[in-house]
Image (tube, grey):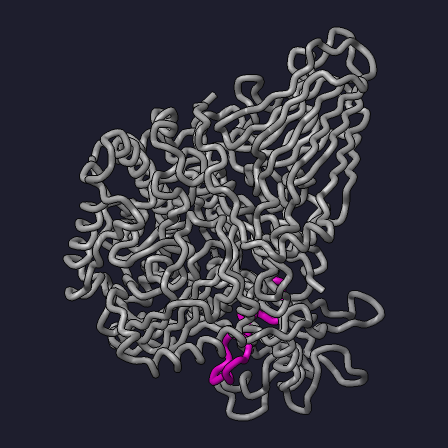
Amino acid sequence: MNIDVNSPRRAPRQLLGALAVVACLCVGSAHAGDSGARHHARGPYDASTYEVVTGDDLAAIAARFGVTVEALKAANKLGSDQIEVGQRLVVAAGTQTGAAPGTPEITGVLGSPSATTTIDGAQLPAPEPAFGGVIKNDALQSTPWWAPRIVPPKTAPNVLLIITDDAGFGVPSTFGGVIPTPALDRIANNGLRYNNIHSTALCSPTRAALITGRNHHSAGFGVISEQSTGFPGYNSIIAEDKATIGRILLDNGYATAWFGKDHNTPAFAASQVGPFDQWPTGMGFEYFYGFVGGDANQWQPNLFRNTTQIYPFEGKPEWNLITGMADDAIDYLNRVNQTMPDKPFFIKYAPGATHAPHHPTKEWVEKISAMHLFDGGYNKLREQIFENQKKLGVIPADTQLEAWPNAVLKPWDALTPEAQKLFIKQADVFAAFAAYSDHEIGRVIQAIDDMGKLDNTLVIYINGDNGTSAEGGPLGTPNEVAFFNGVNEMPVEVQMKWYDVWGTEQTYNHMSAGWSWAFDTPFTWFKQNASKLGGIRQGMAVSWPARIKDKGGLREQFMHVIDVVPTILEVTGIPAPETVDGIPQAPIEGTSFAYTFDAKNAKEPSHHKTQYFEMMGQWALYDEGWLLSTQVNRAPWEAFGVANPDPLNNQVLELYDLNSDFSQSQNIADQHPDKVKELKALFMAEAKKYQVFPMDASVASRVVASRPNITSGRTEFVYTYPMVGLPQGDSPFLLNSSYTITADITVPEGGAEGMILTSGGRFAGYGFYLLKGKPVFLWNLIDLKRVKWEGTEALTPGQHSLEFDFEYDGLGVGTLAFNNMSGLGRSGTGTLKVDGKVVATEKLERTLPMILQWDESFDIGSDTLTGVNDADYQPPFPLTAKLDKLTIRVDRPRLTEEDIKTLENTEAIAVDGKPIHHLQSGPQ
């Protein structure tokens, strides 16, 4: 059973059994508690010494203070067991000499309120220690005893673990990029650069591996949480036998906090009814300030403090989450430092940058635009980054740069002037987002320095949780939600309508994949591509001034994000627990890279020898320099096609020798067929060991797969009270189905207006509301088109029944079982009724096939964050009528036997990738 780390029940669980063992190591196994006729040491004591009284002997004193007789004699230089009345003995257990490994380090007088101890860490939480005082019939004759406070070993550093989002190897200046990242430079120049650390190729999976020290499938995150399926490697649940680094450090005395992106809470457990065991506060992080999900509007995010949604941006149009979370982190660090200066901290710091939407402040866009970094286009940018990398020495001088992939992405010179203008704006905004985020990270680092704690702080700064994202497609997009609904090549002339507001609250923007290819230099391909280094190779800088002296050094050993947890455990002196909450723990699967901190080990062969990679059917196997990988058969923006039915075998296999081919540019599979066969067998063994099977190459279809959320199996939902903040993953899902929404309301004298029900926001969603007294139902089709059903007259005072009925024409998600997406996004007819009378009817030729805006929520009675139609209202737009009852009935299509026969005999079909490209609407 999981125990909430914030629960008061955890408070007394402070001391592991090893301490109780130490307390019993005195002569004759005497116990410090009341053991019958035996006498007790009853003299006065202060913080570190005890005054001998009549009747004392060393055994009694040792028992009282939880030390051994031999330790007492050694600390006081006693040649025998003889002691004298009035003699003062040093009794602080921390004065013990020659303590055995694993023996708790105790400071102060054991039993006093100020005593502390380390634990051996095998069992978490630590069991209750045996009471070490004396209990008689009355308090005056008894001796109080407090369990010591648990602390990490004295040499344990603070830890600041930073991971940015969707940023490839060539993004930051630290690794040859043109985007200024002085905070990352600072860590690298005062510590070490690492040019050979790897991610999993996708957000949630990398983050699960990072905080557990286990491979992403082992941790249940074979894909992002929004694509989870009912298999152990893919269910988006970090199992109880894989405690996070936050939980381990918390129970060993650290202050633990998580800022920014949480993409490791299952999408079906993100509502305010929990359960909260998979939220940061349930995984060992005492404090959480951030957003739950893959992305967030940085101007108006779905933001939480612990598990409560907060709105610090209300009334502050210039507010931005990148600065907001830095401010909150600095405040947290100062509170910890001022309240308990000697308590070490562990911070996971995970900004949303540079995941879409790219939302920097105007100031940063102006700074970057003035630098004209991208005027020459993405081909020249790639060449410039490549030359910078060679000059810096972060890649070998003989690294090969492959030719531009003309068949995948148009070269810059083949673009129209209008496209070039748009693309430069896209890159400026992306770069501003990266630079802005690094600047705010720098403020957090400086705050630690200002406290005088940076010298003993291990800073691990990982650039990106995967390669640069290409989910904007070859042309980019003003609305990333469009990509997730199959619109991935919005014409440039349509996008230009958002040119002047690109990166503001009016866009959910992403850039052209041409820039993404350049930002992954010297490698190829992108985020999602687990078989290419462009998708999995990250840059990392590590500093720890008290320990790392080889400032500015480069480390080239092969590593993976699963290596971070064992590294932290090694340098803190804290072991991986054997059990947590009574659950035996699975082994840590990573390998510590702490050995690389010493200059003498700069060229030490990598301790991490073998590593598999797999993401949505593309896979690879690294083994001591060799890399077997599948040929890329799907660009990331091609997410709506037919899935490879046999991704293990139906692949073209490539082989690379990374010892001599840093950029994975020379396929030598034909020269080493035996090696290919050997490594494929090894991959299969690794895949079986780490829960990779059953391998699944589908992408978009998994977004609409069934999950055990709180709406699962339900067809009717009734609400009688206003409610906001229900996330998409736990709210009624209306897409690809027929449905009826009925609102029974009472209109007061003078009329009413406001939101009855909405889900989604400015970039995709629906709303049912009263506008100037008239009922309106509106579908926002990815901010390209808005379809409105509207009553002809304002509602009179009194009771009314409003109904919106939608009849869907498609077969629904059931077609996905046949590798066929033809049931999604089909047409349907909507009808609005007032008191049973039809007032508006309209047919939608296309509906949204996949998602609404998933960082927005399902709201009743008002609208949080952004609205579905700015032209009609501005949030919160509270409902001024009385909501008597709101009922939603969903009629999901069921396949007939005839449908099934047809699907079984039909070639697999993909969702039309261009459902509404012809729409020409601009920002409203």
Report the span colored magenta. 91-118
Image quarter for residue 33? bottom right
Q: What percent of the width, then of the height, locates residue 683?
A: 45, 75
Residue drawn at x 73%, y 50% as measured from the top left: 896
Q: Is residue 289 left or right of residue 837?
A: left
Q: Nearer the viewer, residue 90 or 623?
A: 623
Relative height, residue 8 to residue 564 (above, below): above
- In the image, farthest residue toward the top: 750
Tell me where residue 918 sits by quadrant: top left
Q: On screen, 507 above or below 515?
A: above
In this view, the residue in front, 352 or 111, is 352
**Observer-nearest of 405 and 8:** 405
Q: Residue at x 56, y 46 (%)?
A: 292
Q: Main secondary structure of the magenta part?
A: loop
Q: Is residue 182 visible?
A: yes
Residue 792 in percent (x, y) is at: 68, 10
Q: Residue at x 78, y 32 (%)?
A: 887
Return the x and y of residue 426 as percentages of the image width and height: 32, 36
